[in-house]
Image (tube, grey):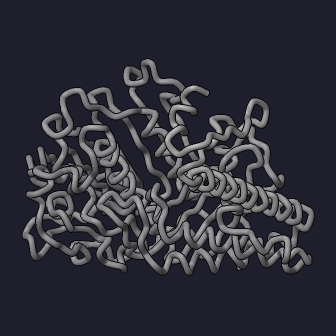
Amino acid sequence: MAEPARQTPAAPAREPAAYDAESIKVLKGLDAVRKRPGMYIGDTDDGSGLHHMVYEVVDNAVDEALGGHAGEVSVTLNPDGSCTVRDDGRGIPTDIHKEEGVSAAEVIMTQLHAGGKFDQDAYKVSGGLHGVGVSVVNALSERVEVEVARGQQLHRQVFERGLPKTRLENLGRAPNRRGTTVRFKPDPKIFGAKAGFKPARIFKMARSKAYLFGGVEIRWSCAKELLAGVDGVPEQDTFHFPDGLRDFLSHAIHGQTLVHPDIFAGRSGKPGAHGGIEWAVAFVADADGFASSYCNTIPTPDGGTHEAGLRAALTRGIRDHAERVGQGKRAASVTTEDVMIGAAAMLSVFIREPEFQGQTKDRLATAEAQRLVEQALKDAFDHWLAGNPTQANRLLDWVIERADERLRRRQEKEIQRKSAVKKLRLPGKLADCTSSAADGAELFIVEGDSAGGSAKQAR
C-alpha cells in the first residue's frame, strides 16, 4: 500500500559499496561528440543543448544521493561563464583502471560510455543509458576542472576540449572533505561566442531537483553580474522540500480554484530505489490540466509509459468509484480525456536502466513503468476516494459534467457537419440562399433551364 507523501523521507544513508576502478565499464568512442554535438545534447543554437550540459553534471551528483551516498549538492554559476557542481558523495574513483592504464576519473571524463552506472552494484538507479554524460560535457567544454575528495585525499585534473591537460594530481590530505566537484566552461567554438547560461533556467532546474528528492539539500549561488535584468532569481538560495511533489504541485497551482481542497499525493516503494514512485494530483476547476513527469529525476516533457500508467489509474479509479456509489450509468461515457482535462499532475518514477526515446531523454519508453505506476496509483486512489467521500463525489460530478460537455460539443459539430453536407448536395437546378436567416429569404422560381443564371444575377 502506498504511504502518504506528508511523511518526511529519511536522510539518505551512506551505505558502503564496491565503487572503485573495477566497477567502471568502458564502451569506447568520443570522437563524434564534437563533430555532431546535437546528437548528444540537443540543439546547440537555441540554448537547449547548452543547458543540457548542466543538467547532466547535476544528474551525476543527484545520482550519488539516489544511491544513498550524498545528502547535499551545490550548483554555482561563475562570473566567467562557467558552472560548478559539487556533491558530498563518495567521489569519483581515482585508482588506475586496469583496461585503460589511466585513472578511473580520467576514463569517466574521456570515454563516451564509461561510468559506474553500467554496474548495478555501484548505482541502484541513475539517469539512464543514452550516451549523454559527463564525458560529453567534457568534450564540449573549453575547459573542465575536476576535484575529487576521496579516502581523505584531494585529487585534481584539468581537461581542455575533451583532452587531458594534466594527469590526475594528488593535492594532499583532505580529512574533512568528500565528494566530487566539476567546473566546466562551454566551448564557444561549439555554442558560439555569445552563448551563456540563463540563470532563471538553471535556478528552476535546481529547485525541481530538490522537489523530486526530498532527502537532498541543493544549494544555489549565482554571480551578481549574471543577474542583471533577471527577475525572481536570488544570488543564493537553499532548496529542501520534505514533502516532495506535494510541495512542488502546491507551488505550481497556487491561487487556482480546485475541484476538491486536498491534493491526492503519495509514495510507493523506496525513493531512489527501483520501482520507487511518487505522485501529486489535483483537479483544477478554472484552468487546463497539465502533467509534469520525471524518471530518475530527469524531466520527460514528452511523457511516456509512466504518464500512460497515471492516466489509466485515475480513469479506472473514477469509473470504479462511480460504480460503488451507484453512478455507473452516468459515468458510462467518461473517458481519459474527461478525467485529465483538469488534472494537474506531478509524477516521479525511479527505474533501473530506463529506456528513452531520443538522445535527450524526453520520453520514457520502459514498458514496465506503465504497470508499476498504474498498479501503485490505482490502489492508492481507490483508498483516497473511499476515505474522502465528499471530495470524491464532488470530483465524480465534475468529471461527468466534462463528459457531458464533450458529448454536446460532438453532437453540435455533427449537426453542423450534416447541415453543411446538405447544403452542398442540392441538385444542380436549385441554388441555396446566401443567408441562413429566415427574414429576407424567399423562394424564387424561374421557368426554363437557361434562364436560371441571368435571373439569379438580376435578383
The residue positioned 53% from the left and 70% from the top of the image is: 306
Residue 16 visible somewhere in the drawing: no
The answer to whether residue 211 is above or below residue 339 is above
- What percent of the width, then of the height, locates residue 340? 66, 60
Residue 198 position, x and y percent, is 38, 33
Q: Residue at x 78, y 75 (%)?
A: 332
Question: Is 365 left, or right, of 281 in this rendering?
Answer: left
Identify the residue shown where x is 69% and y is 56%.
415
Front residue of 444/198: it is 444
Front in this rendered view, residue 333 or 263: 333
Q: Identify whether 352 is placed above or below 45.
A: below
The residue positioned farthest toward the front in the image shown: 448
Left or right: 12 with respect to 417?
left
Q: Find residue 229 and report its horizontal and vertical position in percent.
A: 45, 19
Image quadrant holding the N terminus, namely: bottom right
The answer to whether 134 appears left or right of 336 in the picture is left
Is residue 336 something that shows in the picture?
yes
Q: Where residue 308 sits: x, y (%)?
A: 55, 70
Q: Nearer the viewer, residue 336 or 42?
A: 336
Where residue 61 sits, quadrant-wise, is: bottom left
Figure disc tally:
0
Position of the C terminus by quadrant: top right
Residue at 65% across / 62% down in the picture?
337
**Vertical placement of 354 versus 175: above or below?**
below
